Image (cartoon, rainbow, N blue to C red):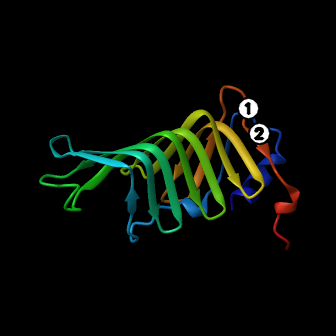
Amino acid sequence: MIVAAVLSLAASPVLAQATTSQMEGMKLSNDEPIQIESDQLEIKEQEKTAYFTGNVKVVQGTTTMRAGKMTVLYTGEGSSMTSGNADIDKIYLDDKVLLTSGTQQATAQKGEFDMASQTFILTGEQVVLSEGTNVFKGCKLTVYMNTGEARLDACGGRVEILLDPKSRQQQ
């Protein structure tokens, strides 16, 4: 779990610009349906782009993503977003991004999901990752969805971590 990985890193004096850990709940789930809600949807089939605006909410399994705007780029000859046969290439999120999965939560100003690399990147002046009472702060959170591994980069300074010793699991 993310806390165990970070606890082992916290003992090291090399905890400066970046932290790497596991986000098991944020692995990609290809076999579960995706539900998307928004105030408005505009599809431009010629551009192979769908624009979701206003209170965007995406749910797949135990993972929920919220944002003010979401742009979906898709590929495939003859593909169509409305017929459900579009292959999603990239997803861009703007305007207060919130990603939750189980006890883990991440917030940022922007997000980008690249299907080819199975990478989800959250960026902003302050990206906050929390699990229970443990809080991690930086400017860029990269999650490798196929493995659940995550990396938090600092804002030119240092990554900030607040660990609650009470959150450690009893052994």
Q: Nearer the viewer, residue 98 or 5?
A: 98
- Amino acid type at image mark 1: Arg
Q: Secondary structure at mark 2?
A: loop
Compared across the picture, whether 93 is left or right of 17 comes to left
Image coords of residue 149 (percent x, y): 58, 54
Q: Residue furthest left?
A: 78
In the image, residue 85 above or below residue 138: below
Q: Residue furthest top?
A: 156
Task: Mark 2 and mark 1 in contact? Answer it, CB < 8 Å.
Answer: yes
Q: Earlier in the sequence, mark 2 or mark 1?
A: 2
Q: Secondary structure at mark 1?
A: loop
Residue drawn at point x = 82 percent, y = 44 percent = 12
Q: Residue furthest front?
A: 39
Q: Residue furthest bottom?
A: 171
Compared across the picture, whether 66 is left or right of 169 comes to left
Compared across the picture, whether 17 is left or right of 50 comes to right
- Amino acid type at image mark 2: Leu
Residue drawn at point x = 69 percent, y = 34 percent = 17
Badge nearest the viewer, 2 or 1: 1
Distance of label 2 from label 1 (alpha carbons)? 8 Å
Image coords of residue 171 (percent x, y): 85, 74
Residue 158's label in the rendered image is: 1
Q: Find residue 154 and report its image quarter.
A: top right
Which residue matches tag 2? Answer: 15
Image coords of residue 143 (percent x, y): 54, 50
